[in-house]
Amino acid sequence: MKVDFQNSRTKENLMRAFAGESQARNRYTFAAEQAEEANLYVLSEIFKFTASQECAHAKVFYDHLTQLAGQTIKVDGTYPIDIADNLLDLLKMAHHNEMEEFEDAYPAFAKVAEEEGFLPVAASFRMIAEIEHSHAKRFQHMAQLVEQAQLFAAQGEEVWMCLNCGHLHRGRQVPEECPVCQHNRGYFVPLNMAPWTC
């Protein structure tokens, strides 16, 4: 049954999602800065890449609110405080939060939107939930690599790429610095995880 958007729970859920995505973007930006200070450029780039996608999600939710432009929506919500001294904890926190959006928040929001007759909004919640699942897997994978001391080492020979200059290194671990551009080992990533490789 179609509900008036002005009086819907969907408009509130959209604002909650917008706030959550905006906060996630900032949390990941802060984590990226922390990773860069630790000379872990590859982790910094993963946080920045994900932050950019969270911004895109926030815009999708915000655009669904266009007909309420100029108004103020009051909502309540709970949002995580992900502050940690080490990046492993930040990766695990990010994984946890992304799974909550995938498993709980966005499916529930989609259900409400569908019940209230806002099918395009329900579709956005469902599609973005799937993207959050891919974010969760990304953070979990990186956390496992850090935890197992395999961020820059592999059990067998691997091809690694320097994200600064593109140098390809073959071996079980990355060099302390890139022999081409002299950037530290924090710039290396397994080739299969490097962006835009063929």
Image (cartoon, rainbow, N blue to C red):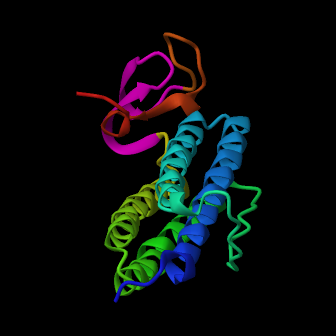
Q: Position of residue 23 (x, y in %)?
A: 66, 59
Residue in the foreground of this view, choosing between 18 and 86: 18
Name the residue located 46 percent from the left edge and 79 percent from the top edge.
Answer: 109
Report if residue 5 lies within the magenta region. Answer: no
Provide the major secondary structure of the magenta segment: strand
Q: Where is the N terminus found, in terms of image quarters?
A: bottom left
Task: Say above or below: 138 vs 112.
Answer: above
Q: Position of residue 70 (x, y in %)?
A: 67, 57
Residue in the foreground of this view, choosing between 55 and 47: 55
Q: Is residue 151 left or right of residue 32?
A: left
Q: Position of residue 68 (x, y in %)?
A: 58, 63
Name the residue located 50 percent from the left edge and 42 percent from the top edge.
Answer: 49
Give the quadrant of residue 81: bottom right
Task: Say above or below: 88 vs 195.
Answer: below
- Residue segment shown in magenta: 153-175
The answer, for residue 145, to whether it is visible in the render is no
Residue that lies at the very extreme toward the top in this rendered image: 180
Residue that lies at the very extreme toward the left in this rendered image: 198
Task: Say above or below: 176 vs 74.
Answer: above
Report if residue 155 lies within the magenta region. Answer: yes
